[in-house]
Image: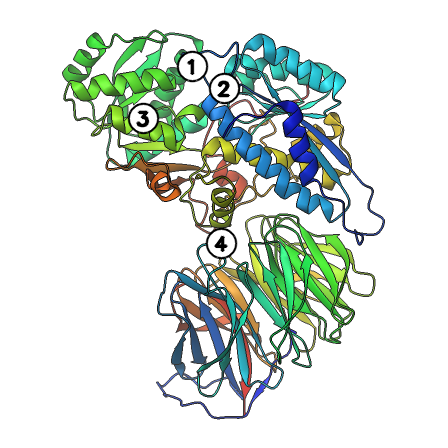
């Protein structure tokens, strides 16, 4: 989709906001919810390295726009109004400027964004200082959750949740010996540490038999590949950024190694386009199993209808970050509607309540954990199609992967939903976010 | 009107298979829509399955879901759609089936994935929730003409008509609403916030109250129909995931299918509290629920076990399981003399 200017975007949103029908519910107070989304869509300042996120930001924009369109239909029933302003902020400095402008000038009470630990940290800080609600839709870093600040809530799954899900699936599938490739930075170390804990503390029988560390943007993988051959693991996991995963997989394939490989599912890797790139780079080993926040082939719990509406709207499957963008708008409006207020502090207080349960088309009521404001939710295991086509028609895009698993399996009766969903992620610091 | 059982005075061809006759002073006839089998199971609970009525030759593509029985008991209406909610296809229709012959006698164009339907007490109007287009539509049963289309929340599903035929209630799954339509003046009255993701709504026989189930909220909202206002919310538990609900003919009990716990929740209408939770021997993931005319039996359509559970309301216990088709979705109960 071609990028639109902020003015063009606002015009389109206004056109969507049709006048409320004459017969709205009597006695309802009209709400005007103003949301600001900070997306690294591109332009000057955009980086073309592993942090280059304009593709995934454009996908998130699709989700946000559809979220506005559908939520406004629901808002119209009661005469409420939703305005979403999208700021293009491709660098950390522009994220800071955009966030302040949206809050102070445009008077938004909700910020949506977060595509990496740095820009998300900026939005966390601005939200906290201004009493704005921040909904993180794509940043996985656990340290963002560990801060436990009152105004920040995370729709994106945490790194710990993704790693727990990966370990759960692969150990159950018989993979006992693990070789881990992580990035040589704080986030890489955090992911690796959590994977070690997940294997040693949670899943009997799995162990790390080797570990390699790479620099960001690295192309040199020879020593690690040699270690992988020598350690004979059952599975190799790349906990790196998306670009390193892609480069590593290509080299791995070229070396003729056939051990199953998977990667850390940061938002950039959970797209049909990324799946295609991965399989082109490594036709055999790239077409394995990956974890995902959402899957366009999910067809239960109302997901079929949501996926179909998105596909009809945009001609593309609903990638994970589109889902989180859509749900961020929906959750923000649901919170405003049910608590009867639109200011950021009231919205955050509502989201923090254990009784505040939301429908995110995953078939179970979800809530935010009180100790880190992480959304409890199930994750999905997808298998990439090694015969996938590069065609851009909807059906070809959809067939690039398909759903093979869900964790926790929420359709099984008999367990409290909160307990079931708390099988994933960090559970140790059970305190409330009051700062 | 969901709570009414109707009289079927014709004899269907029965195949007796030796099922226990205890507790069946009268004969019920069950109609179960099978979402993945593209057919309707016709069941005599005393003897078992009678026959299947095929809706389409494309099981897996075409999905019958919500149903309603005409007041004279001669016709079963079925909401039929496909698995492609983004496009209106020829399969998106309301199908009328002659109960006696099992033949499809008429198709009403609905469009937009009709999910659940209701028929007016005088049989002249069909109302359908159009899931894909956020609308409810009224249709004249005689002429097939549309009476009107009315805005609902996104993903409308549950629908019912008040016993006096005055009001249509429609749930909106993503808007958490019940929309109220005046069925006589054909105008939109109001919208009410209910629980999170409301799936179904049913009026009490006296029309004073209506009840709306909320799947994600795990609740049943009690609505004062005279004011179109929620006056109480009954919690079934977050894990309950309630879908269909039905009110007994005497109005004393509300039976709710708990898909999340494979249970039937029984609400005492006078106290508005859960009186029983029936789990033992239940089929898996009950979505549909119906009650016999005399109130002695409750039936659930179980989507993951392709079965109907028979519940004796005397002991509030499951007494039998009957095979249905693939993906049993909804159930309607009629009465045979």
Q: Sequence order check: which comes first, mark 1 or mark 2?
A: 2
Q: Which of the two discs, 3 and 2, labels the residue nearer the N terminus?
A: 2
Q: Residues within 10 Å of mark 3 (few under 14, many from 20)?
A: some
Binning the other alpha carbons within 10 Å of mark 4 as few (below 14), some (14 to 19) or many (20 upward) gives many
Q: Residues within 10 Å of mark 1 (few under 14, many from 20)?
A: some
Where A342 falls versus B141 (above or below)? above
Q: From the viewer's perspective, is B157 left or right of B285?
A: right
Marked residue nearer the N-terminal end (3 or 1): 1
Residue plotted at (62% across, 50% down): B154
| Residue, disc 2 | A142
Residue on which the image places disc 3: A277
Q: Nearer the viewer, mark 3 or mark 2?
A: 3
The label number, if any, that marks residue B85 in the structure image: 4
- Determine the chain carrying the residue at label 3: A
Badge number at residue A190 = 1
Could you say where residue A53 lies in the image, as x and y percent from the top left? 46, 19
Judged from the image, the secondary structure of the residue bearing numbered disc 2 is: helix
């Amino acid at each position: 989709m071609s990028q639109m200017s902020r003015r063009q975007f606002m015009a389109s949103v206004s056109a969507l906001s049709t006048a409320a029908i004459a017969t709205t519910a009597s006695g309802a107070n009209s709400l005007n919810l103003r949301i600001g989304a900070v997306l690294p869509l591109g332009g000057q300042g955009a980086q073309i390295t592993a942090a280059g996120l304009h593709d995934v930001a454009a996908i998130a924009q699709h989700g946000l726009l559809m979220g506005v369109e559908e939520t406004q239909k629901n808002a119209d029933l009661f005469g409420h109004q939703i305005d979403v302003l999208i700021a293009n902020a491709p660098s950390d400095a522009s994220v800071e400027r955009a966030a302040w402008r949206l809050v102070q000038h445009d008077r938004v009470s909700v910020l949506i964004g977060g595509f990496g630990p740095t820009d998300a940290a900026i939005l966390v800080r601005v939200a906290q200082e201004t009493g704005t609600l921040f909904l993180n839709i794509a940043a996985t870093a656990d340290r963002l959750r560990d801060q436990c600040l009152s105004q920040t809530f995370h729709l994106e799954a945490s790194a710990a949740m993704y790693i727990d899900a990966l370990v759960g699936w692969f150990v159950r599938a018989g993979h006992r010996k693990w070789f881990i490739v992580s990035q040589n930075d704080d986030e890489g170390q955090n992911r690796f540490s959590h994977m070690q804990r997940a294997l040693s503390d949670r899943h009997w029988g799995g162990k790390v038999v080797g570990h390699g560390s790479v620099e960001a943007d690295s192309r040199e993988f020879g020593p690690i590949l040699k270690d992988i051959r020598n350690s004979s693991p059952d599975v190799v996991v790349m906990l790196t950024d998306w670009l390193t995963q892609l480069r590593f997989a290509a080299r791995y394939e070229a070396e003729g190694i056939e051990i199953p490989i998977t990667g850390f599912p940061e938002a950039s890797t959970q797209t049909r386009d990324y799946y295609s790139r991965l399989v082109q780079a490594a036709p055999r080993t790239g077409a394995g199993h990956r974890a995902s926040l959402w899957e366009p082939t999910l067809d239960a719990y109302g997901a079929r209808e949501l996926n179909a509406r998105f596909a009809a709207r945009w001609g593309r499957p609903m990638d994970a970050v589109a889902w989180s963008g859509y749900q961020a708008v929906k959750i923000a409006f649901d919170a405003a509607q049910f608590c009867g207020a639109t200011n950021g502090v009231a919205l955050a207080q509502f989201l923090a309540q254990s009784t505040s349960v939301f429908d995110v088309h995953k078939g179970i009521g979800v809530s935010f954990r009180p100790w880190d404001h992480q959304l409890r939710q199930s994750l999905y295991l997808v298998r990439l199609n090694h015969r996938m086509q590069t065609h851009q028609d909807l059906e070809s895009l959809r067939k690039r992967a398909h759903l093979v698993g869900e964790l926790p399996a929420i359709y099984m009766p008999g367990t409290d939903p909160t307990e079931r969903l708390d099988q994933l992620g960090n559970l140790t610091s059970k305190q409330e976010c009051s700062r | 009107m969901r709570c009414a059982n109707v009289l079927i005075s014709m004899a269907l061809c029965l195949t007796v298979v030796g099922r226990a006759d205890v507790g069946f002073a009268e004969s019920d006839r069950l109609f179960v829509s099978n979402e993945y089998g593209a057919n309707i199971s016709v069941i005599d609970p005393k003897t078992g399955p009678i026959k299947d009525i095929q809706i389409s030759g494309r099981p897996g593509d075409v999905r019958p879901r919500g149903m309603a029985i005409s007041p004279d008991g001669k016709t079963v209406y079925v909401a039929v759609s496909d698995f492609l909610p983004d496009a209106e296809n020829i399969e998106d229709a309301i199908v009328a089936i002659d109960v006696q012959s099992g033949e499809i006698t008429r198709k009403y164009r609905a469009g937009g994935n009709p999910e659940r339907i209701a028929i007016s007490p005088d049989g002249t109007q069909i109302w359908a929730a159009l899931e894909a287009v956020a609308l409810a539509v009224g249709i004249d049963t005689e002429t097939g003409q549309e009476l009107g289309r009315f805005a609902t929340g996104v993903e409308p599903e549950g629908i019912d008509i008040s016993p006096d035929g005055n009001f249509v209630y429609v749930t909106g799954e993503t808007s958490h609403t019940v929309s109220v339509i005046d069925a006589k003046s054909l105008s939109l009255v109001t919208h009410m916030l209910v629980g999170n993701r409301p799936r179904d709504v049913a009026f009490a026989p006296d029309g004073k109250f209506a009840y709306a189930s909320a799947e994600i909220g795990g609740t049943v909202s009690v609505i004062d129909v005279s004011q179109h206002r929620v006056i109480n919310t009954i919690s079934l538990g977050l894990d309950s995931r309630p879908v269909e609900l039905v009110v007994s003919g005497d109005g004393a009990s509300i039976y709710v299918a708990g898909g999340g716990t494979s249970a039937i929740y029984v609400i005492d209408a006078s106290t508005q509290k859960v009186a029983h939770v029936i789990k033992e021997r239940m089929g898996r993931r009950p979505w549909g629920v119906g009650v016999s005319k005399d109130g002695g039996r409750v039936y659930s359509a179980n989507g993951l076990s392709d079965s109907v559970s028979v519940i004796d309301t005397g002991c509030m216990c499951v007494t039998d399981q009957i095979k249905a088709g693939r993906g049993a979705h909804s159930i309607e109960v009629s009465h045979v003399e």
